[in-house]
Amino acid sequence: MKSDTAHVPDSDLHADVAILGGGLAGLTLAIQLRQRHPGLAVTVVERRQHPVREAAHKVGESSVEIGAHYFAKVLGLQAHLDSEQIRKFGFRFFFSEGSHAIDRCTELGVSQLMPTPSWQIDRGRFENFLGAHARALGVCFEDGAVVRGIELGTGDAMHAIRVERAGESRTLHCRWVVDASGRAGLLKRKLDLAMANAHDVNAVWWRVDGIVDPNDWSHDAQWLQRCDPPDRWRSTNHMCGPGYWFWLIPLSSGAHSLGIVCDAKQHPLETMNTHAKAMDWLREHQPQVAQTLDREAHGLQDFLFLRNFSYSAKQVFSRERWALTGEAGVFLDPFYSPGSDFIAISNTYICDLIDKDLTGTDIAPYAELYQQLYFSFYENTLTLYQDQYALFGDPQVMPIKVIWDYTYYWALLAPLFFANRLTDLSTLGRLRPSFNDARALNLAVQPLLREWGERNAKNGGSPESRLLDQFQIEWFREMNRALGDELDTEAFVQRIADNVARMRKLAAELLERARAAHPSIDDHGLAALSAGADATGSSLDAIWYAHAA
């Protein structure tokens, strides 16, 4: 890395890397860079004054395996997560549209903690900790500062960032600039990089005082004892209905995060874009939740809404030494909580590009290749959401979809990140056939699930009332545990191949179940893709016939 400061005026600032935005994406990137290169000059420019308030008004409180591993192991922050945040009790889904009796609804979740941990994260508390930790590592953290202008250099020329803080304006000269400014999208707007996708969804969310515990909604001893420990409140609880889901996420500061996410065509934003409207909407669709939230103990802290929140970008990494990370680049959907995963992935690619630049390596081919990989991960994940919200109220098909989607995640992207092989191009080349096979399977399964749900809806749905316990699926639990295995290259390549074989078997089973319910259903090409896979000895029976209510 060439870091020529000869032409930087004394009154101005200098950094090897300038990060615009000191939220989750920016601060974790700064920490990762300083841990890898203690002598690297890293400056973070953040609009908000620190410390911020806890229960900060941000989406992204629920972490899943990739993001949790990134925070705990890659950045070494597990002690903070264990002591200051809440260990998550997995995802939990209640098919509870219009219900006043949660214990009579189908519930999908785990009865015991899965082996690989994740956490519910109070973003205000976490970002205060990250800011202090970054400063302790030598990061120049300029909080209460506003970016007033960006001039990108070409070739080896430095970039120039005009920063205003406490009424004083100075120029920050830097070799690298990373936009982590969230939806402000400073570089995205400057370079016209915004790009829409075809996922039309809206969200409203708010925070209330006190913890909301689903166990308070039942006096049924058997139902209350289904989980060990009986801590449903620690889950990311999803209250599901046709075209929407409602989240409940506990925060360690003693608040609870709540949000409605919905297909714009089925549930217009105008029906919920104030707190009063949102509560009226809940009284219709989730009356048991609304009754709890009407209590004085759950005072309102804040409220916000976003229209058409999902988007992409034309570019995120450049040979000209700039990059986008976090919501400044792309955003999918809060369902399955992939936000911190994609922060982890983009930050890892940015760190590797900076590593290569430090050694004088031409980063141009790597920036292009890493961008292709990043967008492929984004696009493959988007297929899990696009045109699938109508399924969310189906207690027969949606649990199968959740198991399929998580199998896909644990089979490929999660082990790739855990094994620190995102930038291992030789191994990625060997994995291409497995990734292509898995992608083809997923692209056939998603429309099959959609048609299955549409046919169920025409037949009046499929009422259910039971706990579908994912912990009882032995291979599913083992996939989660195995994420932490340390494997040499040969064993890792074989592991991925075995995971795809598991996907093929599951796909054959899904097709068999769909045809049992609807014999004339289109296989969407899945029969050929899963040919030879043994669908007997149903792996889903372990949950499907357990704990019937």
Image (cartoon, helix red, strand yellow):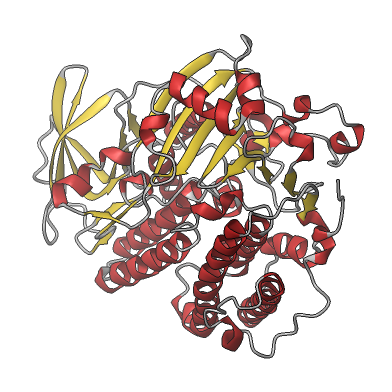
**Res 20 visible:** no
Q: Residue furthest top?
A: 296
Q: Residue furthest right?
A: 221
Position above or below: 293 against 333: above
Q: Residue furthest front?
A: 459
Name which residue lies at 57% across and 25% down: 283
In this image, 359 relative to 103: left or right? left
Residue 221, picture quadrant: top right
Return the residue nearer the eye: 498 or 530: 530
Name which residue lies at 16% across and 52% down: 192
Name which residue lies at 50% across and 31% down: 123
Return the residue nearer the eye: 269 or 177: 269
Residue 473, picture quadrant: bottom right
**Res 200 visible:** yes
Name which residue lies at 22% across and 28% down: 146
Position above or below: 16 against 404: above
Where's residue 166, x and y in %? 21, 17
Where's residue 128, x and y in %? 48, 27
Residue 258, picture quadrant: top right
Position above or below: 123 against 202: above
Where's residue 56, x and y in %? 46, 25
